[in-house]
Image: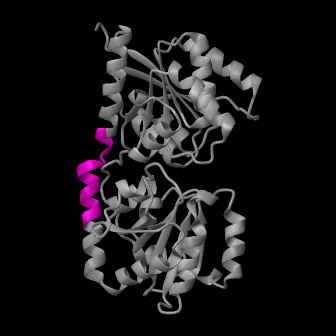
């Protein structure tokens, strides 16, 4: 049986954390013993992992370079006698890999989840130094793969395993209940944004498009689901353009499927992405998506078939596509159903788990480790 430790900065409600939880709770228990380490803090996914019988360690890291937390991670890895340390996101990728290498862990894997244009010289230097010392680097989209190849990482190390989405039963559509809770009129047309509120996501574009459309669709509202450092600035911006009464800032929610069932169209105007969970979830819920035409989004949204792709920052194009969808109920429904089918056929969580199992097994054979009890 292979002992695996997943290392990630937090267990907040976000995309990488969700994929980790889906993977950790679905790996075959007869072949893998899984533990999870959150460097900084736990979060909503901590309870889900513990409920599945997975041990979770929270180290309480406070500083970018935190010797005490590094020592706790070193002791955890050393005492755990792990066969694989699999790290997720930048802070965990360099802390986790460094400690795993010092402890002599047989297999060290990193995960890159986004085309990280924010990274500067120091971050990319760390990536390049650690890459040759890493057995594999999992990427979740061609966009991420191409970005890291362009930064000098070896193509042979980058293993593409797309995100997966669980095939849960459809959430009951309770538009009346949601509308009442959010103080929306019965005839409201609802746009949605789901994600972290920070500059990369360009939430202002969604707000601007709502402002443009209110002149021709007075029953249009925008739900902003998520939290982040841009929250207060976005509220001020919304108030400044005079549409605070049309936008609902809902913060982090545990009932996103219920909210998606009350939306008509999802907006995804990001500047850069990996493979956004919010788009996958909206497609699975049967919503058409209007998204920025960037690598990552274009691997999910098929323009004119499951939604529309528009240039980054083009609020006029967003507004035109949304108006088109609201002017044609048949079109909106057909695009939503096509997206639902695409997710079911190509983006199942089972495929994501199988991809990781295959990678773990291949590396274990290479390192001559036992994979199953007695095997």
> Is residue 183 in view?
no
In reply to whether residue 342 is colored magenta, the answer given is yes
Residue 241, image x, y percentages: 67, 83
- Which of the 4 quarters of the picture holds residue 135? top left
Going 65% across and 36% down the picture, which residue do you hit? 123
Q: Which residues are magenta?
A: 338-351
Residue 276 position (above or below residue 248) = above
Which colour assignment does the render follow? one colour
Q: How many marks?
A: 0
Residue 347 position (above or below residue 79) = below
Is 108 displayed left or right of 298 in the figure?
A: right
Is 40 displayed left or right of 81 in the figure?
A: right
In reply to whether residue 22 is colored magenta, the answer given is no
> Is residue 247 in view?
yes
Front residue of 303/8: it is 303
Going 67% across and 37% down the picture, which residue do you hit? 121
Is 318 displayed left or right of 211 in the figure?
A: left
Residue 251, image x, y percentages: 60, 62
Residue 159 position (above or below residue 135) = below
Residue 6, image x, y percentages: 51, 28
Residue 246, image x, y percentages: 58, 82
Is 28 displayed left or right of 136 in the figure?
A: left
Identify the image quadrant of the N terminus: top left
Identify the image quadrant of the C terminus: top left
- Which of the 4 quarters of the picture holds residue 199? bottom right
The secondary structure making up most of the magenta span is: helix
Going 53% across and 79% down the picture, which residue do you hit? 209
Going 58% across and 67% down the picture, which residue do you hit? 203
């Amino acid at each position: 049986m292979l002992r695996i430790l997943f290392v990630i900065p937090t267990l907040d409600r976000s995309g990488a954390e969700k994929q980790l939880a889906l993977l950790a709770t679905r790996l075959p228990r007869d072949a893998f013993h899984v533990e999870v380490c959150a460097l900084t803090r736990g979060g909503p996914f901590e309870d889900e992992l513990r409920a599945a019988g997975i041990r979770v360690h929270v180290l309480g890291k406070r500083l970018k370079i935190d010797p005490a937390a590094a020592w706790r991670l070193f002791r955890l890895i050393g005492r755990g006698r792990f066969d694989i340390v699999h790290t997720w996101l930048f802070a965990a990728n360099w802390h986790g890999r460094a400690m795993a290498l010092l402890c002599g862990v047989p297999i060290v894997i990193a995960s890159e989840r986004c085309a990280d244009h924010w990274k500067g010289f120091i971050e990319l230097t760390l990536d390049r130094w650690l890459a040759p010392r890493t057995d594999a680097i999992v990427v979740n989209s061609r966009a991420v793969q191409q970005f890291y190849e362009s930064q000098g990482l070896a193509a042979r190390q980058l293993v593409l395993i797309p995100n997966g989405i669980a095939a849960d039963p459809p959430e009951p559509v309770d538009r009346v209940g949601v509308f009442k809770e959010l103080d929306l009129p019965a005839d409201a047309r609802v746009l949605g944004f789901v994600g972290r509120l920070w500059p990369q996501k360009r939430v202002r574009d969604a707000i601007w498009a709502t402002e443009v459309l209110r002149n021709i669709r007075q029953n249009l509202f925008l739900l902003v689901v998520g939290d982040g450092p841009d929250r207060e600035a976005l509220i001020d911006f919304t108030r400044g353009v005079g549409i605070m009464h049309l936008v609902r800032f809902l913060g982090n929610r545990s009932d996103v499927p219920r909210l998606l069932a009350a939306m008509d169209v999802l907006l995804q105007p990001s500047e850069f992405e990996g493979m956004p969970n919010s788009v996958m979830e909206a497609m699975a819920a049967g919503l058409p998506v209007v998204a920025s035409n960037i690598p990552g989004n274009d691997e999910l949204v098929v323009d004119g078939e499951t939604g529309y792709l528009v240039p980054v920052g083009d609020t006029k194009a967003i507004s035109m596509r949304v108006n088109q969808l609201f002017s044609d109920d048949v079109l909106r429904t057909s695009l939503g159903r096509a997206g639902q089918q695409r997710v079911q056929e190509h983006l199942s969580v089972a495929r994501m788990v199988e991809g990781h199992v295959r990678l773990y097994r291949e590396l274990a054979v290479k390192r001559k480790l036992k994979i199953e009890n007695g095997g």
